[in-house]
Amino acid sequence: MVFGQVVIGPPGSGKTTYCNGMTQFLQLIGRKVAVINLDPANDALPYECTINIEDLIKLSDVMAEHSLGPNGGLVYCMDYLENNIDWLESRLKPLLKEIIHKSNQTVFLQIIIFFDFPGQVELFFLHQNAKRVIMKLMKNLNLRLTAVHLVDAHLCSDPGKYVSALLLSLSTMLHLELPHVNVLSKIDLIESYGKLAFNLDFYTDVQDLSYLQHHLDQDPRSAKHRKLTKELCEVIEDYGLVNFTTLDIQRLTVAAVQEKYMKDDEMFDNNESDDK
């Protein structure tokens, strides 16, 4: 049994940065990691990619050959991946069976897998192809996957956008039917977008959304949809599923580096003591 994360979220929410940061963090604490790029439009990867969907299909080729825009092209690519799931499975299987030998014993080295998906949100709350890809991998390869849904923290500074982020998160949770973690990414930059109307806990715990109504009414664009927004907030609260955790991926990586150096120093001191 191998564990992994399905990393999803709107464009610019920090999915690739998250995969890169988590790779560095886990490697620093001695864990084996594989990152699978399933975004056929992402051709500038900051991490070492174990499997790349561009070896199977490229968005630019699909758009040129079928006269599709980027959104239609991504849907086509996900359909193509689903129809060629054997290609992905055949490349994942060797990673799941890596063995190391230690003290004349066979030890299975457990790997953590990150699936870096495209940022087109329709793939995860409307279309079925990405969900079917995930379910087939879980069934055929005995993977245990969790969805990590990233949302840019700056949306909290705009009540209307925050409600939209809540609705997107809820729709995605219901559609994918996976263990699910919603993350406010780039939390270190949140104050640069303006002062929040409430404490951060209000936004992470998704507390009484009726308090947002006054702030929504101050915006002429939101005021005319007041009743619709109120009903949407009630739907979100009735389900009671959505909350957020916060993440500053750079701070996490720095902490891992510091921990590694502390362990190295401790091992060095112990070795010096043994020599004496």
Image (cartoon, rainbow, N blue to C red):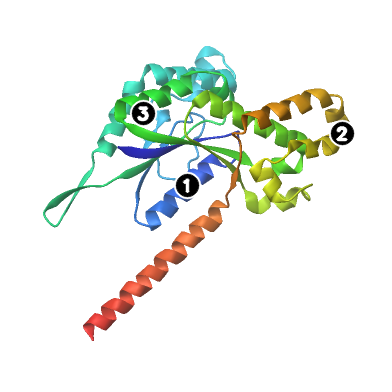
Mark 3 closeness class: few <14, some 14–19, many ≥20 residues within 10 Å: some
Can you tell which mark lies on residue 138?
3
Q: Is 264 situated above or below 194?
A: below
- For the point 31% across and 72% down, the residue is 267
Q: Amino acid at mark 1?
A: Asn
Q: Amino acid at mark 3?
A: Met
How far apart marks 2 and 3 lie (CA) works out to: 45 Å
Q: Position of residue 73 (x, y in %)?
A: 53, 19
Q: Position of residue 221 (x, y in %)?
A: 85, 29
Q: Amino acid at mark 2?
A: Asp
Mark 1 closeness class: few <14, some 14–19, many ≥20 residues within 10 Å: many
Mark 2 closeness class: few <14, some 14–19, many ≥20 residues within 10 Å: some
Q: Mark 2 or mark 3: which comes first in sequence?
A: 3
Frontmost of labels 2 and 1 is: 2
Q: Nearer the viewer, residue 30 or 17?
A: 30
- The residue that mark 2 highlights is 217
